[in-house]
């Protein structure tokens, strides 16, 4: 989690877009908004009526709010039908070059009341409801329910680096995410079907 909202606004791409949808402002305006929140502006100016969705620092969040923020921030890809081979990893939204994808993230148990699911981004909510329909009865769920990296297909021109867990190029939403199996030690023995070309 980010230490303060200002850092998150500057560095978390998904949250920037979330703020853009909430405040319809520039990044500078969003940073100024974050400063106001962190300085207690809205608490001190009780006459000011905030009409947009309230933004709070992760430090001020309760456990449920932290879980929702975590899912919204880290859920960037999912399993889907690959145009190359079987199952692949598909981007849920536009991912920028250098952005972390969290493809190697391990499963975690969440308990979020169904009444709070509206706070999840639509693409995140859709995945959870498809995988764990009993959440409508306020049951817990596991996310991710699969290690995405285990299903990632190979490409000679990858758009993902498993070492840094970052995108090597801009990846449009609904595009497949690929790694280069040839960076794995003894890849020729493990993946004999891959042509022996120089690794870029």
Image (spheres, rainbow, N blue to C red):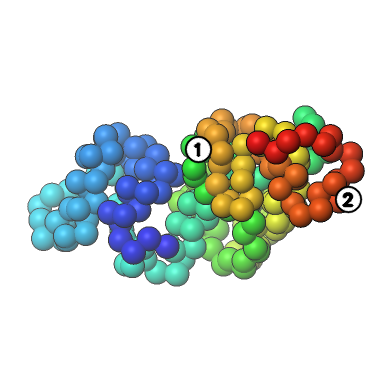
Residue 177 sits in quarter: top right
Please give the residue where the numbered disc 2 appears in the rendered image: 189
Instruction: Depth check: give the residue in front, 150 or 144.
Output: 150
Residue drawn at x 17%, y 61% as measured from the top left: 40
Pick whichever, 100 or 109, lies toward us: 100
Q: Position of residue 10 (x, y in %)?
A: 32, 47
| Residue at 45%, 57% in the rendered image | 69
Of tags 2 and 1, the one toward the viewer is: 2
Q: What kind of element bears circle 1?
A: loop
Q: If you read the primary sequence from the N terminus, does the residue marked by circle 2 or circle 1 appear first?
A: 1
Measured as percent of width and height from the top left, residue 23 is found at 29, 39
SS for dot 2: helix
For residue 97, the mark is 1
Say left or right for 73 vs 43. Answer: right
> Can you give x and y, in whole percent of width and height, for residue 9 in the image?
32, 49
Q: How many tags in the picture? A: 2
Contact between marks 2 and 1 (CB within 8 A): the answer is no
Q: Residues within 10 Å of mark 2 (few under 14, many from 20)?
A: few
Quadrant, the C terminus = top right
Determine the residue positioned at 34% across, 64% down.
3
Whole-angstrom CA distance, mark 2 to mark 1, is 31 Å
Q: Position of residue 54 (x, y in %)?
A: 30, 52
Q: Residues within 10 Å of mark 1 (few under 14, many from 20)?
A: some
Front residue (pair 16, 66): 16
- Using the rendered image of the protein, determine whether residue 93 is visible from the camera's viewpoint: no
> From the viewer's perspective, is residue 18 above or below residue 43?
above
* Quadrant location of the N terminus in the rendered image: bottom left
Q: Is residue 6 visible?
A: yes
In the current view of this chain or complex, which residue is farthest to the front?
Answer: 198
Q: Is residue 29 above or below residue 46?
A: above
């Amino acid at each position: 989690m980010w230490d303060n909202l200002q850092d998150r606004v500057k560095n978390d791409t998904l949250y920037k877009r979330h703020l853009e949808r909430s405040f319809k402002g520039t990044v500078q305006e969003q940073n100024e908004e974050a400063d106001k929140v962190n300085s207690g502006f809205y608490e001190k100016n009780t006459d000011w009526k905030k009409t947009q969705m309230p933004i709070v620092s992760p430090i001020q969040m309760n456990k449920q709010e932290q879980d929702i923020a975590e899912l919204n921030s880290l859920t960037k890809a999912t399993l889907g039908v690959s145009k190359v081979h079987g199952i692949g990893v598909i981007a849920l939204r536009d991912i920028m070059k250098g952005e972390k994808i969290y493809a190697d993230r391990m499963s975690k148990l969440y308990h979020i009341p169904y009444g709070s699911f509206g706070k999840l981004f639509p693409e995140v909510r859709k995945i959870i409801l498809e995988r764990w329909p009993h959440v409508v009865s306020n049951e817990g769920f596991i996310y991710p329910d699969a290690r995405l990296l285990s299903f990632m297909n190979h490409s000679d021109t990858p758009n993902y680096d498993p070492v840094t867990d970052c995108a090597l190029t801009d990846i449009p939403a609904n595009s497949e995410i690929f790694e280069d199996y040839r960076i794995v030690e003894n890849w020729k023995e493990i993946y004999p079907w891959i042509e022996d070309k120089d690794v870029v």
